[in-house]
C-alpha cells in the first residue's frame, strides 16, 4: 500500500468520501473518524475528535515587555486551544515581579501564583481551561518595584483533548 502525500490529503473532499461511502467502500465508522481529521496551520494532519485520543501539541510561548513602577498588567497569550496543561514557567526580570495565571480574563479562578522574584523556573503541571473562549493563557503580572522593570517570560504548555 502506498503512502498518501500531504497534497493528496488536501485534495480529498468530503464529497468524494461520501461518494465512496455510498458505494460501500468506506464504513460509517471509518467515515466518522476521517471527518475528525484536519490540517493545522503548520500543515500537520491532526485529529480533532476524542474517540481515539490524539497526540498532545507542545507550544512554547515567549514574551518580553516593560512594566512601569508598581504597574500591574494583564497579558493574554494566544495558544490556539482552550484546554491545556501548563507545564513550565521561566520568568526573568530586572526587578521583583509576581505572576498569576487565571482561567478567565474577567473574574477568573486563580490557577497559579508566584511570590515576588526576579528569576524563577517552575515546573507547574496544572491543567487549565480558558473559560473566556478566546484560547488564551491569562496572566496578571505585577511590578513590585519602584523602578521600571523589564520582564521576560517563557511558558510551555501542552494541549488537552
Image (cartoon, rainbow, N blue to C red):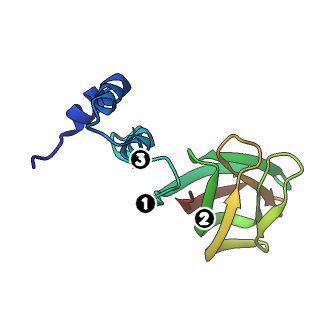
Q: Which image quadrant: the C terminus?
A: bottom right
**In front here: 65 or 131?**
131
Answer with left or right where residue 51 lies relative to residue 128. left
Residue at the far left: name it: 2
Q: Are marks 3 and 2 in contact (CB under 8 Å)?
A: no
Left/right of residue 130 with respect to residue 145 in the rendered view: left
Secondary structure at badge 3 equals helix
- The image quadrant that residue 100 belongs to is bottom right
From the top left corner, tell me how far across and down residue 129 is, in percent.
Answer: 70, 55
Residue 105 in the image, given as x and y percentages of width and height: 80, 46
Mark 2 secondary-structure assignment: strand
The Cα atoms of the two marked residues, 3 and 2, are separated by 30 Å
Earlier in the chain: of badge 2 and badge 1, it is 1
Residue with the mark numbered 1: 55
Residue matched to label 2: 85
Q: Earlier in the sequence, mark 1 or mark 3?
A: 3
Residue drawn at the location 35% of the way across and 22% of the way down: 15
Label 3 vs label 2, nearer the camera: 3
Please give the residue where the numbered disc 3 appears in the rendered image.
29
Q: Where is residue 158 shown, x and y percent of the image?
A: 53, 61
Q: Residues within 10 Å of mark 1 (few under 14, many from 20)?
A: few
- The answer to whether residue 145 is seen in the rendering is no
- Give the class, few, some or many, for how many residues have Cα within 10 Å of label 3's Cα (few <14, many ≥20): few
Query: 36 and 39: which one is in front?
Result: 36
The mark lying in front, picked from 1 and 3, is 3
Could one spot residue 35 in this view of the protein? yes
Residue 111: give x, y in percent of width and height.
Answer: 77, 66
**In whole angstroms, how far apart are the C-alphas of marks 1 and 3?**
20 Å
| Residue in view at x 65 percent, y 64 percent | 93
> Which of the marked residues, 3 or 2, is nearer the chain's N terminus?
3
Amino acid at each position: 500500500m502506498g503512502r498518501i502525500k500531504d497534497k493528496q490529503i488536501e485534495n480529498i473532499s468530503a464529497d468524494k468520501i461520501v461518494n465512496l461511502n455510498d458505494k460501500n467502500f468506506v464504513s460509517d465508522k471509518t467515515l466518522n473518524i476521517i471527518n475528525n481529521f484536519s490540517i493545522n496551520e503548520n500543515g500537520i494532519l491532526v485529529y480533532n475528535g476524542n474517540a481515539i485520543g490524539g497526540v498532545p501539541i507542545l507550544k512554547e510561548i515567549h514574551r518580553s515587555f516593560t512594566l512601569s513602577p508598581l504597574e500591574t498588567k494583564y497579558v493574554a497569550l494566544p495558544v490556539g486551544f482552550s484546554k491545556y496543561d501548563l507545564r513550565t514557567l521561566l520568568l526573568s526580570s530586572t526587578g521583583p515581579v509576581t505572576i498569576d495565571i487565571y482561567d478567565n480574563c474577567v473574574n477568573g479562578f486563580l490557577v497559579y501564583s508566584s511570590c515576588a522574584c526576579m528569576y524563577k523556573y517552575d515546573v507547574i503541571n496544572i491543567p487549565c481551561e480558558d473559560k473566556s473562549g478566546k484560547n488564551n493563557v491569562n496572566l496578571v503580572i505585577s511590578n513590585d518595584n519602584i523602578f521600571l522593570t523589564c520582564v521576560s517570560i517563557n511558558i510551555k504548555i501542552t494541549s488537552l483533548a
